[in-house]
Amino acid sequence: MARQINSIFIVDEDLCYGCGACIAVCPIDVLILDDRLAVVDEEKCSHCEHCIPACPVFALSIKGVQD
Ligand code: SF4
Ligand code: SF4
């Protein structure tokens, strides 16, 4: 799937508590856990959105860079 142009995948660091649910569902393994925080390799993220509903605290989103 193509990445969404002019958008970036974001982890809200204030909300994420490191449960790892998003990491388990990412089909291309671009999320890692670093000191109880999910960290994305954004340039490799496909913006597929599979992980977004997996987060219990709604910490994941894809935002337009011009927002
Ligand atoms: S949007 Fe898709 S590719 Fe990007 S981190 Fe989430 S599951 Fe992985
Ligand atoms: S699912 Fe949400 S709370 Fe859990 S590690 Fe991922 S971003 Fe953080």
Image: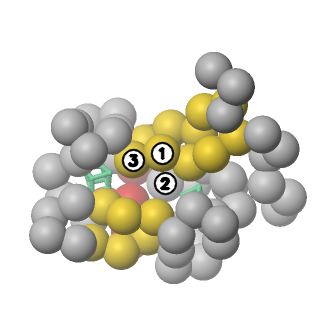
Marks 2 and 3, Cα distance to the nearest angstrom?
11 Å
Q: Are marks 3 and 1 in contact (CB under 8 Å)?
A: yes
Q: Going 39% across and 47% down the picture, which residue do you hit?
A: 11
Q: Nearer the viewer, residue 18 or 42?
A: 42
Q: Tell me which numbered mark, 1 or 2, is placed earlier along the sequence.
A: 1
Q: Extreme top residue here?
A: 67
- How many marks can you see? 3
* Quadrant of the image occupied by residue 35: bottom left
On the image, numbered disc 2 is attached to which residue? 51
- The residue that label 3 is drawn on is 11
Label 3 residue near ligand 2, CB within 8 Å: yes
Is 39 placed above or below 12 here? below
Question: What quarter of the picture does the N terminus occupy?
Answer: bottom right
How many residues crowd around disc 1 within 10 Å: few (fewer than 14), some, or many (20 or more)? some
Taking depth in this image into account, of 60 and 39 the one nearest to the observer is: 39
Which amino acid type is marked by label 2?
Cys
